[in-house]
Amino acid sequence: MPADTGSLIASIERDPEFQALHRRRARFAWTLSAIMAAIYFGFILTVAFAPHVLAMPIAGSTTTLGIPLGVGVIAAAFVLTGLYVRRANTDFDVATGRIVERAKSEALT
């Protein structure tokens, strides 16, 4: 790695806005991960300890409650991924670009 690239990286890592961005992004990612883990493990624990709940038919049909709940777990993963991508594209990427441009302009002066 060239010396100027290393100093640019060091400059970015010291930037208070970068540090705040890193904390915000990590907090958001961990929150979404915790939500997904709760949904997934809630479903798995229901399968393990209360299978009769998932075996209940919906409105007298042959479809049981477990089918839409299982689909809901999968849909939740897509929705949470979409939320992360949207926030990354609108908030995190904009802030990252601003930080990098500021660091590059400071490096040139």
Image (spheres, helix red, strand yellow):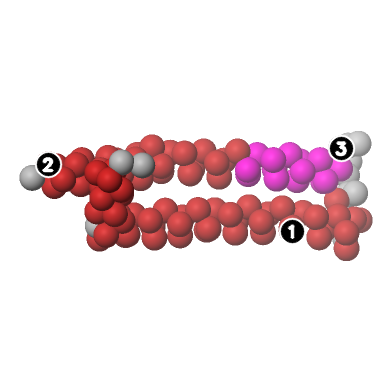
Q: Which residues are magenta?
A: 64-77
Disc 1 crowd rating (10 Å Cα; few below 14, some 14-19, many 20+) is few
Q: Nearer the viewer, residue 4 or 32?
A: 4
What SS does tag 2 mark?
helix
What SS does tag 3 mark?
loop
Question: Foreground mark, 2 or 3?
Answer: 2
The residue sitting at the left extreme is 109
Identified at 27% across, 40% down, the residue is 97
What SS does tag 1 mark?
helix
Image location (x, y in percent) of residue 39: 68, 54
Residue holding disc 3:
63
Which amino acid, by three-letter code, is at mark 1? Gly
Identified at 8% across, 45% down, the residue is 109
Among the two numbered marks 1 and 3 on one chain, the one whose residue lies closer to the N terminus: 1
Residue holding disc 2:
108
Image location (x, y in percent) of residue 8: 25, 47
Residue holding disc 1:
42
Asked if residue 12 lies left or right of residue 71, the reply is left
Question: Foreground mark, 1 or 3?
Answer: 1
Asked if residue 70 lies left or right of residue 83, the reply is right
